[in-house]
Image (spheres, rainbow, N blue to C red):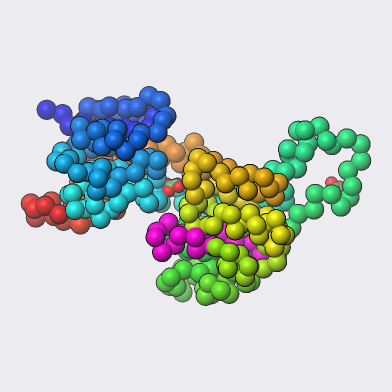
Amino acid sequence: KRLKVWVSRPLFADVLARLEQYVDIDAEAVERVHDAQELKQRLAAVDGAIIGLADRVDAATLAGNHRLKVISNLAVGYNNLDVEALTKAGVLACNTPEVLNETTADYAWALLLAAARRVGAAERWLRAGRWRGAMRFDDWLGVDLHGKTLGILGMGRIGQAIARRAGGFDMRVLYHNRSRLPELVEHGCAAHWVDKASLLRESDHLVLVLPYTAENHHIIGAAELASMKQGSVLVNIARGGLVDEAALAAALREGRLAAAGLDVFEDEPVVHPDLLALEQVVLSPHLGSASADTRRNMAGLAVDNVLAGLGVGPGAGRPPAPINPRVLAMRERGGKA
Ligand code: GLV
Ligand code: GLV
């Protein structure tokens, strides 16, 4: 009997067809949110699942589920998954790292540039038909990126890809990370480690690229915003919960920060009304990895993960991107996790 996989979001047809060569699939044709109860039911009826960030899996979701073997997350971040609970339940969890690094770094620069140079507000102004006759020479003045200091909070692979691009803008790059990168890696992206306080104080443009964890909740709050450089720009391409959104809106209103570029929000798809009210914030609906090539690669990797996790298909070896490889070790020993 063929194994069964639930796909919670519409995916590229050819990628689904490849999955269907090896397993029976139950693929959602329409994008929608699954509540906790439906998610639990869906996951109880399959051997594997490909899910998105809106699908939250915890101990309650898995309670009584003796069938599920693998969850393949369509994202690199996996704060939607309770990894501890998955491991306890013997369910392998996988994500899509690496394939989105460069695309997401590109997008960080899109927001850095758009926020600093006021691209969003200026376009709205133009489309509203307000560019009539003479525009003042000192209208729409933004802030420069070139020659300034770029700060990166969270220096994983995406942070490093952002840093490498800064060379073309002649920027000084500072970063903060819990652990300092090896010198060779620092050299490769021409970035220098500083403590968090110095990063906030010295950056003209600050990008957040950290994973969202309980300890990183509101890592940029009122106190941090107050210590940022006057007139600086904040970009968040990681997770909304890293930033206290009301405090950010206040810092922008007061003019402490010049602008912000936000791709992620604490309560997606809801955007804090104080942020929506501000012209100097560039807002986008969580698009960091959304290039055609990269979204295809992510979907392909999610399929590879689920097939290998179920031990079927061409690469029926080790899944390419396990989050809790302990489950694989347990399986090899023939025990439960
Ligand atoms: C998107 O936010 C991801 O984690 O891939
Ligand atoms: C601006 O477009 C200029 O020509 O200076």
Can residue 309 be seen in the rendering of this structure? Answer: no
Whether residue 321 is in magenta: the answer is: no
Quarter of the picture holding the C terminus = bottom left
Image position of 311 with respect to 173: above or below? above
Whether residue 219 is in magenta: the answer is: yes
Indicate the position of residue 188 as horizontal and vertical percent values: 50, 66
Q: What residue appears at the point 52 percent right and 48 percent down from the top-left corner?
A: 265
Q: What segment carries the magenta color?
A: 204-220
Quarter of the picture holding the N terminus = top left
Indicate the position of residue 306 as horizontal and vertical percent values: 26, 40
Q: What residue appears at the point 48 percent right and 46 percent down from the top-left corner?
A: 267
Image position of 293 with respect to 274: above or below? above
Q: What residue appears at the point 68 percent right and 48 percent down from the top-left corner?
A: 278
Q: What residue appears at the point 25 percent right and 55 percent down from the top-left corner?
A: 84
Quarter of the figure with residue 134: top right
Q: In the drawing, does residue 106 fall left or right of residue 132? A: left
Indicate the position of residue 125 as horizontal and vertical percent values: 77, 38
Q: In the drawing, does residue 246 fall left or right of residue 182? A: right
Can residue 248 be seen in the rendering of this structure? Answer: yes
Indicate the position of residue 17 as horizontal and vertical percent values: 31, 26
